[in-house]
């Protein structure tokens, strides 16, 4: 069986889709699937082509025995809609012309978003005689519309029509959460869907075997501080302004410290708000490679995971949850719906605060910072739950069975 994964994002970039797709590819390879990847020149999160890959120096390579083909992409730091569309559509164009030179496959699996990559995927699946698998990690354009990121009615109409066409052309639609799957089936009852969740490599994240690497010292924090850690994109969906507002309310509790590690479109605004509020208990740290995360998580106390209060996020499970819980870290979750059901209600892995509720978040920060024993129990529950229900090895094996049936 031959599978081509088409994605704009892939290692050596760091990020949730990059890690998730690579981990899946490696495990499918072990299952006997001949997996290859067609992707862009790495540029995320700084939005500039990595030095090793500039001027198209690396057009193909192997990463952990996975054959990776690369095509050019227009990269810009601009947040304006036209440059961002050029970024997406440049890869749509180049990925098609790069991909059509490859040999035939049994399946072509495309990662969405960006939804526009569906144009390339549909044409390539026909050219390469491959059954199309449309992998949905975010309900775009629905989420973009509801967050107010895209407001142009014509653009939204085109995007919804493309979404419908991609779903009906796909042999199989895979969704990262059951919320995504249920949303798609409610709107397109005749399509074939499969739950392909994110997960964690419990062998890589082993708290008993990880040695701390001085993260507290680098962040300017002491051993007595209770660190609430957010690691990931600093974007529109997360609503991190609320975290800063809550941090202001708990300044008198001097042991509470919040670390925001990552990059993204909201970073400048967050740093400006940080200065405006004159916060002394919030630290910004740059994003790091996946290999550094276990040691960082070892040094923190609580994983802080917020999202904005939107119905579209009822079915969201942010990927950053899994690694933190595997490292036996308690969870402070500001996500309603599926994530709360799994990790708070069933897993007893932490506490929940109402999304975008500053007072509730502040109260939970104080509550969790006051009981180390409670945090330890939550952490033990956390690892047990993700190891049982979200083990990457099990996820890959189940997906392989689904491929054989299609």
Image (spheres, rainbow, N blue to C red):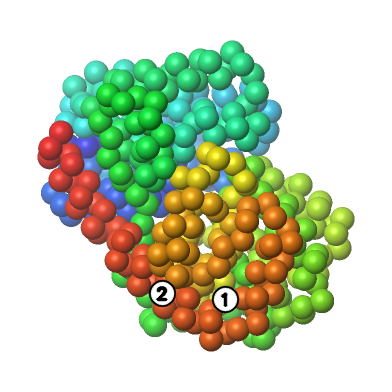
Image: 106 above or below 364: above
Quadrant for the C terminus, please: top left
Q: How many marks?
A: 2
Quadrant for the N terminus, please: top left
Across and down, in percent, residue 371 comes to 60, 83
Is 325 situated left or right of 102 in this image? right
Across and down, in percent, residue 392 comes to 29, 58
Q: Residue at x 34, y 31 (%)?
A: 185
User: Under tag 1, what secondary structure?
Assistant: loop
Q: Residue at x 53, y 44 (%)?
A: 313
Image: 77 above or below 22: above
Image: 372 above or below 131: below
The image quarter containing residue 271 is bottom right
Q: Which circle, 1 or 2, is nearer the viewer?
A: 2
Q: Is residue 52 visible?
A: no
Mark 1 crowd level (few <14, some 14–19, many ≥20, 10 Å Cα)? many
Residue of label 1: 301
Mark on residue 293? none
Q: Nearer the viewer, residue 192 or 345?
A: 345
Q: Residue at x 50, y 20 (%)?
A: 159
Residue of label 2: 381
Across and down, in percent, residue 373 comes to 53, 86
Q: Nearer the viewer, residue 55 or 223?
A: 223
Mark 2 crowd level (few <14, some 14–19, many ≥20, 10 Å Cα)? many
User: Under tag 2, what secondary structure?
Assistant: helix
The numbered mark, 1 or 2, whose residue comes first in the sequence reads: 1
């Amino acid at each position: 069986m031959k599978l081509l994964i088409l994605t704009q994002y892939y290692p050596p970039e760091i990020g949730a889709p990059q890690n998730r797709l690579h981990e899946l590819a490696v495990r499918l390879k072990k299952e006997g699937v001949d997996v290859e990847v067609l992707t862009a020149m790495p540029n995320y999160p700084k939005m500039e082509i990595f030095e090793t890959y500039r001027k198209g120096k690396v057009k193909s390579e192997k990463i952990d025995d996975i054959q990776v083909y690369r095509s050019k992409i227009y990269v810009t730091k601009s947040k304006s809609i036209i440059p961002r569309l050029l970024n997406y559509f440049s890869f749509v164009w180049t990925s098609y012309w790069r991909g059509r030179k490859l040999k035939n496959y049994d399946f072509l699996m495309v990662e969405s978003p960006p939804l526009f990559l569906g144009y390339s995927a549909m044409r390539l699946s026909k050219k390469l005689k491959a059954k199309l698998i449309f992998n949905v990690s975010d309900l775009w354009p629905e989420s973009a519309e509801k967050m107010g990121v895209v407001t142009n009615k014509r653009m939204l109409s085109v995007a919804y029509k493309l979404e419908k066409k991609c779903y009906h052309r796909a042999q199989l639609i895979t969704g990262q959460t059951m919320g995504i799957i249920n949303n798609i089936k409610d709107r397109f009852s005749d399509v074939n869907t499969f739950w392909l969740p994110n997960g964690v490599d419990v062998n890589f994240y082993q708290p008993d075997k990880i040695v701390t690497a001085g993260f507290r010292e680098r962040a300017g924090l002491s051993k007595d501080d209770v660190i609430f850690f957010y690691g990931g994109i600093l974007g529109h969906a997360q609503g991190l302004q609320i975290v800063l507002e809550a941090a202001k309310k708990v300044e008198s509790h001097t042991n509470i410290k919040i670390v925001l590690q990552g990059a993204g479109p909201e970073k400048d605004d967050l740093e400006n708000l940080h200065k405006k509020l004159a916060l002394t208990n919030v630290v910004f740290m740059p994003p790091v490679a996946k290999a550094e995360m276990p040691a960082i998580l070892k040094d923190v106390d609580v994983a802080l995971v917020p999202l904005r209060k939107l119905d579209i996020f009822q079915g969201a499970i942010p990927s950053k949850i899994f690694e933190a819980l595997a490292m036996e870290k308690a969870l402070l979750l500001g996500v309603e719906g599926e994530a709360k059901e799994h990790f708070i209600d069933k897993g007893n892995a932490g506490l929940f605060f109402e999304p975008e509720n500053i007072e509730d978040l502040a109260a939970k920060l104080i509550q969790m910072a006051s009981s180390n024993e409670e945090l330890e129990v939550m952490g033990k529950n956390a690892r047990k739950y993700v190891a049982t229900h979200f083990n990457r090895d099990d996820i890959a094996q189940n997906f392989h069975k689904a491929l054989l049936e299609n």
